[in-house]
Amino acid sequence: MVEPYDILALSRESHKMDIQKADSYTVRRLRRTAGLLNEKSVLDVGCGCGLLHRILGEEITYVGIDFVKESLMSGKWLGFSSAHKIAASAHALPIRDNSIEAVVCSEVLEHLPYDLPEKCLLEAFRTLKDGGILILSVPNFSHLVNRLYFLIWGRVRGLNDTLHVNFFSADNLERLLKISGFKDIKRHGFDIFLEPSSLLTRLASGIPYSVRKGIANYIHILDQLIMLKASKGSTNENSLSPPP
């Protein structure tokens, strides 16, 4: 059996060749993430080159953590110079307990093998202040295209992708969040396509984003991402119902 840390080493080498860029999908995803935040201190786990910092603004106290130290170098960095940048792993955050108002973990868990996604969430919970929030997103394993792909070809799309080693539905992601202590879990729609790479998605890109986001928000099988907002210490009932 390949050890999880061997897989992480392979993933790190792969990500060195896939440094974060300000492409349309990444910008759209991180703007959607930023729209769910109003906190003044943000820990960005798996920050890449810090594009989220640029979107949030320099007035935010921003801590970016990534296991690919090349992403944090000045020649690659897309965030502001005021950022606190740390080369570290998502499942072992070098951050004090109860010190951060918001944690972002966007497209990270699918790269973590075995039980490391749960360890990552436990670490996020530990670092958050009481009442702090987590914004979490992963590819939607239950997307309609994935289901059709399995129905037609009998195999899971993306299973041989060396960068993606874990797959999530909304249900098992909610379960992991609850195990980690998070409450008040709400799903927020992202979009019905990633990049306009086919005729259908190019046509869909002509639909205003507010409409596409609304469709994704209420028809989850069409949403490309599972994007959840959860809190530490909330007394509200856990829910995956769409926000008003």
Image (cartoon, grey):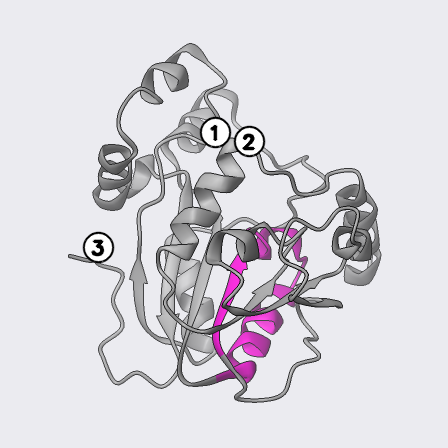
Q: Badge 3 local density, few (<14 within 10 Å), some, or many (20+)?
A: some
User: How many numbered marks does the figure carry?
Assistant: 3
| Residue situated in front as seen by the camera: 2 or 79 | 79
Residue 200 x, y percent position in the rendering? 37, 14
Q: Is residue 119 left or right of residue 125?
A: right
Relative height, residue 148 to residue 97 (above, below): above
At numbered mark 3, what does the secondary structure look like: helix, strand or loop? loop
Would you name the residue on which mark 2 appears? 157
Amino acid on which the number 3 mark rests in the picture: Pro
Is residue 124 a member of the stretch shown in magenta?
yes
**Labelled disc at residue 242:** 3
Quarter of the image where the C terminus is located: bottom left
Residue 139 visible, this angle: no
User: Disc 2 marks which amino acid?
Assistant: Arg
Local SS, label 1: helix
Query: Is 117 part of what is drawn in magenta?
Result: yes
Contact (CB < 8 A) between labels 2 and 1?
yes
State which region is magenta. 101-128
The percent position of residue 124, horizontal first and vertical second, equals 55, 75
Tell me how far mark 3 sits from mark 1, CA to CA: 27 Å
- Tell me which residue sits at (59%, 51%) in the image: 110
Residue 72: x and y in percent read: 75, 56
At which x and y percent is residue 201? 40, 19
Q: What residue is disc 1 on?
A: 150
Circle 2 crowding by C-alpha within 10 Å: few under 14, some 14–19, many from 20: some
Kind of residue at disc 1: Phe
Q: Which is nearer the N-term, disc 3 or disc 1?
A: 1
Q: Earlier in the sequence, mark 3 or mark 2?
A: 2
Residue 123 as seen in the image, left or right of residue 148: right
